[in-house]
Image: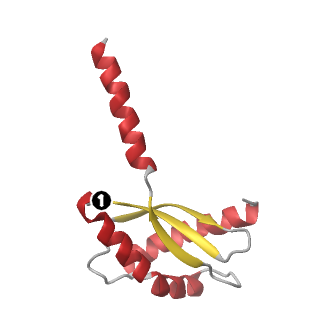
């Protein structure tokens, strides 16, 4: 990614986090953390990576976020000065779970010694 798309992606993370925390009224969207955003070079698509506090409601929350992407995109257009706001797709960020798994494996190895 270029410097421009990196800057836009980091701005999207900040603004989407604010929108989710303060402006979304949907009861299915609670305790969501935006961890990263990947924007295509032509700014037509953005993949927003999120984590959810309640793991059992992960699927419902991702579905609700994707359903609310139009509202989020419209609100984002008011906040970010970009000519074209990309289509937003919300994806669960597996890296946190992967990090916990690796940490548990390391702890088991240390316990065996």
Side of 80 relative to 28 (left or right)? right
Q: Quadrant of the N terminus?
A: bottom right
Percent across and percent down for residue 63 are 37, 74
Q: Residue at left 27%, top 58%? A: 55
Nearest to the observer: residue 19 or residue 92: 92
Quadrant of the image occupied by residue 19: bottom left
Nearer-the-camera pick, 2 or 64: 64
Dividing the picture into quadrants, the one containing residue 12 is bottom right
Residue 73 lies, with reference to residue 92, above or below; the image says: below
Disc 1 packing (10 Å; few <14; some 14–19; many ≥20): few
Locate the C terminus by quadrant.
top left
Residue 109: where, in percent of width, then height? 34, 20
The x and y percentages for residue 83 are 71, 85
Task: Give me the residue at 54% from left, 76% from top.
Answer: 88
Identified at 46% across, 65% down, the residue is 91
Q: Say how many tags the image has.
A: 1
Side (left or right) of 66 relative to 10: left
Judged from the image, the secondary structure of the residue bearing numbered disc 1 is: loop
Quarter of the image for residue 57 reads bottom left
Of residues 8 and 92, the one nearer the viewer is: 92
The residue at which mark 1 appears reads as 53
Q: Give the image location of residue 82, x and y in percent.
A: 68, 81
Q: Residue furthest top?
A: 113
x 73%, y 68%: residue: 41
Left of 104 or right of it: where is 86? Answer: right
Q: How is the image coloured?
A: secondary structure
* Left or right of 50, for residue 76: right
């Amino acid at each position: 990614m270029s410097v421009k798309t990196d800057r836009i992606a980091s701005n999207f993370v900040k603004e989407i986090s604010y929108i989710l925390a303060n402006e979304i009224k949907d009861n299915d969207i609670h305790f969501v953390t935006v961890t990263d955003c990947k924007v295509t070079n032509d700014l037509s698509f953005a993949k927003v990576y999120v984590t959810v506090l309640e793991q059992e409601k992960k699927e419902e929350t991702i579905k609700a976020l994707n359903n609310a992407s139009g509202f989020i995109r419209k609100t984002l257009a008011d906040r970010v000065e970009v000519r074209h706001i990309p289509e937003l797709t919300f994806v669960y960020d597996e890296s946190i779970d992967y990090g916990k798994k690796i940490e548990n494996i390391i702890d088991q190895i240390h316990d065996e010694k």
